[in-house]
């Protein structure tokens, strides 16, 4: 089995990015299992403290995962603070964290026209700071994501096909490892 860990970037219940995350998870092949990190449970990063059980759980999930998939909106041209907080917890010790060498797929969304492309670049740079391995592929940026959710379900077939092809290539790369 291949194990994926999803990181959401939005905490709101009706998040379009989370709807897309769930749609991607639902379309994984049968030999792939997935979990979603509970980034809402994490305290603010503080190097004076180990973060307790929520951080321990996150580190164990990242360590056990064969690959990590981020599905996040863009906030103020970058990565939402809640997601950056989760990444910061998982990034220690520097250059030797659970993210070192970890294959990562990045998907960004926005309500507007640009699909979170600036957050996409920032997130890949952040991953490089941890010596993680952002998957090289056409950028999966999803504009007007809010309009693509119908009754709580992400329903844009073109996006699902494009992201699905990237996911297949990502899984193939993990299996070759
Ligand atoms: C704090 C904040 C900052 C935002 N900054 C951006 C931005 O820089 N670029 C953008 O395209 N949309 C931005 N938006 C709009 C989001 O794309 C929109 O709220 C989207 O629905 C959030 O994703 P979600 O549906 O997954 O929660 C921002 C929204 C919030 C709440």
Image (cartoon, grey):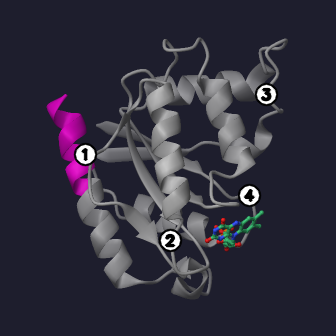
- First in sequence: mark 1 vs mark 2: 2
Question: Which mark lies nearer to you, 3 or 1?
Answer: 3
Residue, disc 2: 115
Q: How far is disc 1 from disc 2 in space, using C-alphas? A: 23 Å
Residue, disc 4: 11
| Residue toward you, 30 or 13 | 13
- First in sequence: mark 4 vs mark 2: 4
Q: How far is disc 3 from disc 4 in space, using C-alphas? A: 17 Å
Q: Are marks 4 and 2 in contact (CB under 8 Å)?
A: no
**The quarter of the displayed image where residue 18 is located:** bottom right
Q: How far is disc 4 from disc 1 in space, using C-alphas? A: 26 Å
The image position of residue 135, as x and y in percent, is 31, 44
Q: Is residue 153 visible?
A: yes
Residue, disc 1: 171
Does residue 145 appear to the left or right of 46 in the view shown? left
The image position of residue 144, as x and y in percent, is 54, 82
- First in sequence: mark 2 vs mark 3: 3
- First in sequence: mark 3 vs mark 1: 3
The image position of residue 159, as x and y in percent, is 37, 76
- First in sequence: mark 3 vs mark 4: 4
Asked if ligand 1 lies within 8 A of label 3, the reply is no
Q: Residue at x 28, y 60 (%)?
A: 138
Q: Which residues are magenta?
A: 168-177
Q: How far is disc 4 from disc 2 in space, using C-alphas? A: 18 Å
Residue, disc 3: 45
Question: Which mark lies nearer to you, 1 or 2?
Answer: 2
Q: Residue at x 77, y 35 (%)?
A: 42
Q: How far is disc 2 from disc 3 in space, using C-alphas? A: 28 Å
């Amino acid at each position: 089995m291949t194990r994926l860990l999803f990181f959401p970037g939005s905490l709101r219940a009706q998040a379009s990015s989370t709807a897309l995350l769930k749609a991607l998870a639902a379309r994984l092949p049968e030999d792939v299992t997935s979990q979603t990190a509970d980034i809402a449970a994490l305290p603010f990063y503080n190097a004076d403290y180990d973060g307790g059980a929520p951080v321990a759980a996150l580190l164990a999930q990242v360590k056990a995962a064969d690959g990590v998939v981020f599905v996040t909106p863009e906030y103020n041209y970058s990565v939402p603070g809640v997601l950056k907080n989760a990444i910061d917890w998982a990034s220690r010790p520097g250059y030797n964290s659970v993210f070192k060498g970890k294959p990562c797929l990045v998907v960004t969304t926005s309500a507007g026209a640009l699909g979170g492309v600036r957050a996409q670049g920032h997130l890949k740079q952040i991953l490089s700071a941890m010596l993680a391995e952002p998957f090289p592929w056409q950028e999966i940026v999803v504009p007007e994501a809010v309009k693509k959710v119908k009754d709580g379900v992400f329903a844009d077939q073109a996006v699902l096909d494009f992201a699905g092809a990237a996911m297949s290539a990502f899984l193939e790369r993990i299996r070759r490892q």
